[in-house]
Image: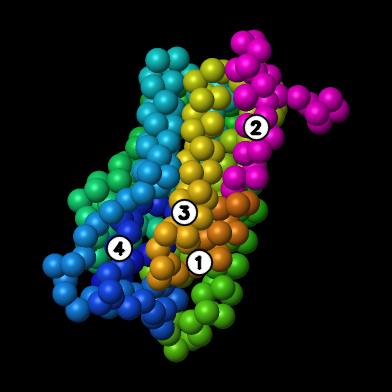
Amino acid sequence: HILFRQGSHPVFEIPFFAKASVELDAVGRSGAVTVNNQEDVKMSMNLFRLSGDMSHVFSIIILLLRLRVARNAQGISLRTHELFLLVFVTRYLDLFTTFYSLYNSCMKILYIFTTGSIIYMIRFQEPICSTYDKAQDTFLHWRFAVAPCAIIATITHLIGSGLKNFELLELLWTFSIYLEAIAILPQLIVLQRYREVENLTGNYIFFMGAYRAFYIVNWVWRAYHEPAYQHHFVVYFCGVLQTLLYADFFYYYVKSKSKGGKFTLPTSHNA
């Protein structure tokens, strides 16, 4: 049996051959593939999923460059990146249990390491940490993001699996899906308070949103082109919610780029 998860980060798809059958396993994973001839199993990735992965990587590179070049953290939310680090750590614990591919493992390690580096730079590295404005980054992420997502994930997992088939890694994976959907909220609130968005910061947020948008197209593509594709509606709901959170930002980002002026977000009075 080869297990694969239809999560929101890179896991290579397994093409389905005539001898392969797909079933939902008892612990609520996305699916299990039974293959009679393992030589028939080949790893593949469609263009939309690859574009999503590269958009995500590009957004992280932009932010790291922005911190190193500008040497300040103005307009950057530390709390958003603490949430993202929690997302990656809880989602990628299977690094210690399952090997999917070299690409998959490298991408998981890259996300954890780079996000941890961003947090370290904002918290401890001078002069960057001295420019971080805690007064603007005030979203109570542990109370209003982590705690609710943990409760919802627990309920979702128990409904799907029950106490008899409870599995901690599955619960943490579900938690990470919910949390990622709203992890960008502290950053969007900080930008709304600053109003004027620095160019590299704007590009970073844009590519973060593009990553999720590409993944939605990837799901549609897979549903039409993979006969045995297993739908995961929690992932769908969270992916659409996450993309909708970026919608207002996308509008003003594209508007500013088309006019060539400064990127300024409206206040609540003139939005």
Comparing 258 with 206, the one in front is 258
- Please state if 41 lies on the left or on the right of 53 as rendered: left
Give the distance between the C-alpha atoms of the residues marked 1 and 3, in whole angstroms.
Answer: 14 Å
Callout 4: 10 Å neighbours few (<14), some, many (20+)?
some
Of circles 1 and 2, the one toward us is: 1
Of callouts 3 and 2, the N-terminal one: 3
Q: Residues within 10 Å of mark 2 (few under 14, many from 20)?
A: some
**Mark 4 and mark 2: span between their CA atoms?**
36 Å
Residue 189 percent coordinates (x, y): 66, 35
Q: Which residues are magenta?
A: 242-271
Q: Circle 3: is it few (<14), some (14-19), or many (20+) Cα within 10 Å?
A: some
Q: Which residue is mark 1?
A: 232
For marks 1 and 2, give the CA distance: 27 Å
Mark 4 vs 2, N-terminal side:
4
The picture places residue 201, in percent across and down from the top left corner, at: 52, 24
Compared to 261, does 239 lie above or below? below
Q: Foreground mark, 1 or 4?
A: 4
Label drawn at residue 221: 3
Q: Secondary structure at mark 1?
A: loop
Amino acid at the residue labelled 3: Trp
Residue at the limit of the structure toward the top, as seen here:
261
Q: Which residue is at 55% across, 25% downward?
A: 202
Compare marks 3 and 4 and give the one earlier in the sequence. 4
Q: Is residue 102 left or right of residue 227?
A: left
Secondary element under disc 4, as helix, strand or loop, is loop
The circle on residue 15 is: 4
Q: Say if residue 118 shows up in the picture.
A: no
| Residue occupied by mark 2 | 249
